[in-house]
Amino acid sequence: MNDAALTDLLAACRTYTGGRVDTRFNAAAQAFYASAKAQPKIAGRAARELSRLPPPGAAVLANMLGTIVEKGGAVERSGPAVWELYLAWLPQIHRGFAGRKELSSRQRQLLDAFQLLSQSAVSHLSGMPQERALAAGNKALMTQLAELQDYTPGAAWVRQVLLSCSDDLLVLHLPSRQGFRLRYENIVNCFHLFTLIQAAFGERLPGGRAPNRFIVDMARCVTVAEEGNDEPWWRYQTVQPEPGLVEISGEASVETISRIDGRQIILLSPPVEAAALWDTTFFTPQLFAMPANVVLEGTLTKQQAEEWFAKFGLPAGEAPDVEGADRA
């Protein structure tokens, strides 16, 4: 393997101090990209050097490795090293803010480079589901990310990655007695889910309408989020053993939606008066490496739908009793 491109890039990374790269660095970077395309294993060799580089150079190299992954490179070549570096930097930055003192020169240097490293972490984690699951269950890590997210977008982005969920969903429309199978991807909160459920159905159900493409494109990470609001076309409820049907809180995690026979359940009915709107901040931070979406996968037969309604104690013609909770 010809390592000349990697050797030149590493030399440039060792002298890089941040900011815009110079002509020499840019030439080394372009040669490295070309070499990595011809010899994919070079990305793995580069990743093994990350921990030996000063923070500015390590961050820019990690970011380049993330670009390679986004263009189809194998995530396993560089993902573990990038994530290991992120986990090494995060507590050092966290200690600086937790101590409520002026950051040390080392902490400041790490913070300045953290955004580039975080972009790479997002690119890699999008293709590392096992690592995401392990990290999401690490309470200490999630606490650090939550406490840092207001100080650096790098913590907010990675926290969003780890909170994002994908799952199957059964949606039952009470007035029309219809049932549908849906799949949602990379969603954290229920308001975001409601917007994309509405986009998936459009005018197909009573009470539906033509989706607002401006809002939907932001919700799907097609365009950058701007100020805007969405509103519920239906009342969103789920099922609990007691007291039965309950409102789904729009601000809550999608994981709070109840499961029956392994599938999450949402029931739709006409909206209540003065139901709360939600704004586009519920779609952020946007992860363009892990775009959110909801797909309508299939329709239940009339018999299948009625079996589900009967399972919830909702025979045909009977209005449901709804107990309180936060209204979406």
Image (cartoon, grey):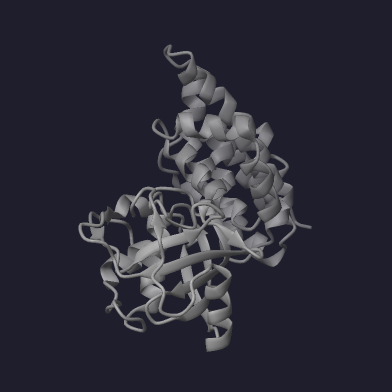
Please state if 76 lies on the left or on the right of 209 as rendered: right
Residue 95 vs 222, above or below: the answer is above
* Residue 239 percent coordinates (x, y): 51, 60
Q: Is residue 223 left or right of residue 104?
A: left
Nearer to the camera, 28 or 61: 61
Q: Position of residue 178 (x, y in %)?
A: 46, 81
| Rendered residue at 57%/87% (across/down) | 303
Residue 72, given in percent of the width and then of the height, sits at 62, 66
Quadrant location, the N terminus: bottom right
- Count numbered badges in the picture: 0
Residue 211 x, y percent position in the rendering: 29, 75
Q: Residue furthest right?
A: 1
Q: Examine the image and state in which quarter residue 88 appears.
A: top right
Inspect this view and state whether residue 15 appears. Answer: no
Which residue sits furthest left? 274
Q: Picture quarter containing residue 139? A: top right
18 up-or-down from 301: above or below: above
Quarter occupied by residue 221: bottom left
> What residue sits 41% from the left and 42% below the top?
20
152 is higher (above) or lower (below) than 94: below
Residue appearing at x 36%, y 71% in the figure: 198
Q: Residue at x 63, y 58 (%)?
A: 127
Query: Looking at the rendering, in which quadrant would you find the C terminus?
Result: bottom left
Would you say residue 97 is visible in this rendering? yes
